[in-house]
Image (tube, grey):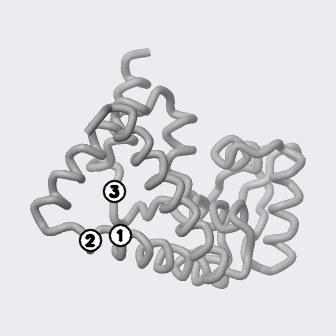
Amino acid sequence: MHESQIGNLLGALSLELSGAQELAAQKAAGLGTSACAALVTLGPYPGMTVGELAKILSLSHSVTVRLVDSLAEAELVARKPGKDRRYVRLRLTSQGAALRHKILAARASVLSGALALLDRDERAELGQLLSIMLTGLTQSREQADHICRFCDEDACPARRCPVECKAISIAGAQ
């Protein structure tokens, strides 16, 4: 198979899986993609600021403020005062945490369906190849956080995540 075809197939697969994950999350939560990503991101990181969330989601600060406003109004996210009046710390409410689990389950269903097309050895090989590619693609802490914005951190804990390990390595080298 030619390199250009391999790249084309990778692009098609990544778009299909991305779209399927987003659609499954939206259906599970009844929310848009950015709101779903915000809930997934905030779960393991209570106390994150609006600014930090904006960077991870690649949204402007004002768009993120409106997103947090809508999530707070829906009682999915709670705000707490930060170290001064300019900073607000965010955390999921119990409703937000429950919805986060629904989003992650819907995402996992899409991905397990795709992986079921491969046998055990092919899945193991794919896992190794994905680790190599993600390690090579990770260039910064900010990018790492963006890459993993929809990830289930229980399924891929930091100590085994190739993206997180690369981000830590980059930070240690600076």
Q: Which residue is mark 1?
A: 114
Q: Image check: 141 left or right of 81? A: left
> Is there CB contact under 8 Å for labels 2 and 3?
no
Q: Secondary structure at mark 3?
A: loop
Q: Residue at x 78, y 80 (%)?
A: 75
User: Residue 74, can we see it?
Assistant: yes
| Residue 46 or residue 20, whichever sits in front | 20
Where, quadrant-wise, is the C terminus in this rendering?
A: top left
Q: Which residue is mark 3?
A: 157
Counting labels gives 3
Q: Secondary structure at mark 2?
A: loop
User: Residue 168, can we see it?
Assistant: no
Vertical order, 164 against 89 (above or below): above
- Horizontal and vertical percent for residue 171? 43, 25
Q: Earlier in the sequence, mark 1 or mark 3?
A: 1
Q: Image check: 161 left or right of 65? A: left
Residue type indicated by callout 3: Pro
> Is there CB contact under 8 Å for labels 1 and 2?
yes
Q: Nearer the viewer, mark 2 or mark 3?
A: 2
Q: Earlier in the sequence, mark 2 or mark 3?
A: 2
Residue type indicated by callout 1: Ala
Q: Quadrant of residue 142?
A: top right
Residue type indicated by callout 2: Leu
